[in-house]
Image (tube, helix red, strand yellow):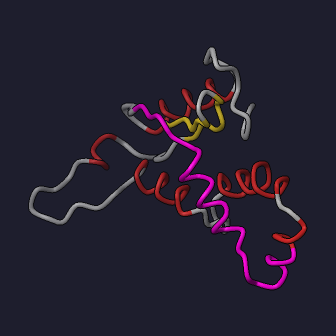
Amino acid sequence: MYTVWRDEEFVYAGMSGRGAQREDFVVDSGGPSQAKGLWTRLNSHASGRRSGDQFNVYVCDRFIVPGLTPAQQRQIGQGQLFLDELTKSFIREHLGYRFAVYADGAEALAVERSIRGGALSAARPFLNPL
């Protein structure tokens, strides 16, 4: 379960591994390790690619699009500037994350929903409140 922050502003709460169990993340010492669960999700978010990543769509819609200048809009229309690249840059320059690991996906999902509903003193997340 993770939260995303812009300085002190609570931006987003999410989780990864909805159906996962603790043993799904045990690394086999005899084989190559692969990023799983949380790391895969955070890497996807950090990519800035909006296709298939709702977090990146939210970031683009709420932080990038409102600040576009007419010149940037023309560049996007001409294929000289890309929203995915602007989104990626914004995420990497302005956002950070915190995370907690839970015993299984069901517990992480319950905590995520509680936090999205306002359980933290920081209130509800800007991008995906319940």
**Is 39 on the left or on the right of 52, as rendered?**
left
Asked if 63 appears above or below 88 in the picture, the reply is above
Which range is magenta?
Answer: 74-100
Q: Is residue 81 above or below residue 38?
A: below
Q: Quadrant of residue 31?
A: bottom left
Instruction: Residue 105 in the image: state x and y as whole percent.
Output: 46, 39
Q: Quadrant of residue 79?
A: bottom right
* Residue positioned 75% across, 49% down in the render: 63
The number of numbered badges drawn on the structure is 0
- Image point (43%, 57%), residue name: 40
Farthest right residue? Answer: 70
Q: Which residue is more in the foreground, 90 or 122?
A: 90
Residue farthest to the bottom? 78
The image shows residue 71 at horizontal and vertical percentages of 86, 71
In the figure, is residue 75 to the left or right of 12?
Answer: right
Q: Residue at x 66, y 36 (%)?
A: 11
Q: Is residue 121 above or below residue 62?
A: above
98 and 73: which is toward the camera: 73
Viewed as shown, does residue 32 lie left or right of 73? left
Quarter the C terminus occupies: top right
Q: Position of residue 6 (x, y in %)?
A: 61, 37
Q: Position of residue 47 (x, y in %)?
A: 54, 63
Pick out the residue farthest to the top.
Answer: 121
| Rendered residue at 40%/36% (across/down) | 104
Q: Is residue 81 magenta?
A: yes
